[in-house]
Structure formats: C-alpha cells, structure tokens
Amino acid sequence: MIERRPPARTRPLIVGLLLIFLGACAHTPDNNPAAPPGEVAVHDPAEPVNRVLFGFNRVVDNWLLKPLATAYGWLPEPVNDGVHNVVTNLSEPGVFINDLLQGNGRRSANTLGRFLTNSTVGVLGIFDVASHWRMPYHDADMGQTLGVWGIGDGPIIELPLLGSSNSRDATGRVIGLFLDPFGQTDSETVDTIKTGKRVAGTLDNRYQALPLTDRLEQSPDYYQAMRDYIARRRAELVFEGRVGAVAPEAANDDAPAPTASPEQRPTPAGAEAP
C-alpha cells in the first residue's frame, strides 16, 4: 500500500490551519507557569459521545491489546528491556526537536547526548547506557510544546484506538507527523524502521501501563478516572517543559515507566508510538 503524504508546499498551510484551530479552542494559560499544576480542570462537553468511543476502545483493549501486552510480559526480562530501550531511543530525535522548539537548551543537550550514547555504546539503543551515565530520559512531544507556548488544553476528545486527549494534544499529534524525522522520506528501510517502532512501541506502552490501568479499572467510573489521570499527567508534562526539568519526577509510584510516546500515555486502547 502506497502511503500518500501532502506535498511539501502544502505542509506549512496545514500546520498554520491547525494552529488557528488551536487558538480558537484554547483557554488562557495559568498566570504562574512556574507553579506545579494542582487540580486540573477538565472540559468535557462531548462526554456522552466520548464515553461511547471509550467503550469501543475498551473492547479493543480487552480483546486484543491487553492480552498481547500480557503475553509480551511473559518474555524474558532482557528481551522486554531491550525492546523498550530501542523504542525509546528511536523516539529521541522527536524529543530533541520539541526540546529545541520549547527553548530548553539543557534538555535538548541531554536528549542529544542520550541518543548518541545509546546508539553507539548502547548498541543501537538496546542498552540504556545513557541513564547510567546520568543522562536521564524525559518525554517531549508537540502537544506539550504547544502547551509550553501558552496554548490551552481545549475540550476533551476520545480518539478511536488512541484514547483520551484534549484538542491541543490531538492537534499536536497531527503537527508532529510533519516534524517526525522518520516521516519525511520515501526510503523503504526507514519506512520499515518506522513501522517496527510503531508496532513495538504500542505493545511496549500497553505493557508498561498494565499496573496503572489495572488500578484505574477498580474506580467507580473508569472513564472519568482515566480521563482525569491523563489530563493531570499532561499538565505535569507541560509544567516540566516550562521549567526545563531534565530529570522530571514521576507523577506517582504507579505511573508507567517513561516510554517512547507521551502522548501517549496509557489509554484503554493503548498508545500509538509517535
């Protein structure tokens, strides 16, 4: 199947239209961007529709992604660690671009150092040598970048197969496609790497999220618990980008380990690797 991409001359126009859309749905950012996020206000005007889509996502998760992730967890730990490290390493170029767009010099230097170290000494990213050399992993994506720039969350959108998001982060996903270092090429080799990264990243993300989703499923309202957790985690990521935190603290002890995608965050239908 041939993947069709918009002509290069149309890409700035598409990105511009997306930014206009974001401006229309954004709310005023916090007056004190250096303050850690407290209680996050969630705007969910389409909740009935979102709950229907959430139900669909949960069926897909229960019958496909969760069983696959559970089986993946039965593999030897070195195999799981190697897949996780490779997926994370392949995400570093995208993280680096967003670090630069956010004006975070220390974070971008840390990300570049991680990528060079793990791609060489870490044998193409199989081993996370950089973390042992005091270059910790941090996440960054276009949705976070837009938040750092002051664009508000906008309303909640439940995306089929991708889970809960807000309009800013959903638009950031689309913009991120045009900034993806692996996305602007016709090379079959690069396309194969990109496909492998997406498949392995989806499986690894879902596996990493199993403890969290198992806990949230015990809540009286799973939809609300998942939606609010993701909204809070996204607010924390925007805060980390604003202050330029190189080694962010985990949101809580049950949060999944850092993975290739944030936006990605644990969702009932899994998270697509960026």
Image: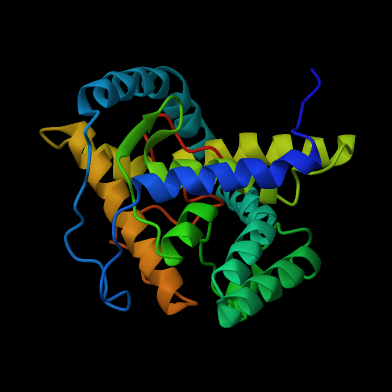
Q: Residue at x 62, y 81 (%)?
A: 133
Q: Position of residue 242 (x, y in %)?
A: 42, 73
Residue 149 vs residue 16, the one in the foreground: 16
Colour mapping used in the image: rainbow
Pick the residue in front: 31 or 95: 31
Residue found at the very far left of the displayed protein: 220
Q: Residue 159's spot in the image, x, y percent?
A: 41, 29
Decide: is 20 above or below 99: above
Tell me which residue sits at (57%, 40%) in the image: 174
Q: Is residue 222 above or below residue 146?
A: above
Q: Image check: 53 left or right of 190?
A: left
Question: Residue 46 appears in which quarter of the rendering?
Answer: top left
In front here: 11 or 127?
11
Give the percent coordinates (x, y) of residue 257.
Answer: 44, 56
Quarter in which the N terminus is drawn: top right
Which residue lies at the image location 56% right of the left edge and 52% below the top edge? 260
Q: Position of residue 225 (x, y in %)?
A: 20, 41
Compared across the picture, whether 138 is left or right of 224 comes to right
Q: How many marks?
A: 0
Q: Is residue 20 visible?
A: yes
Q: Quadrant of residue 222?
A: top left
Q: Quadrant of the C terminus?
A: top right
The answer to whether one can see residue 75 in this image is: no
Which one is nearer the viewer's eye here, 15 or 158?
15
The residue drawn where x is 48% and y is 33% is 69
Left or right, residue 26 beside residue 244 = left
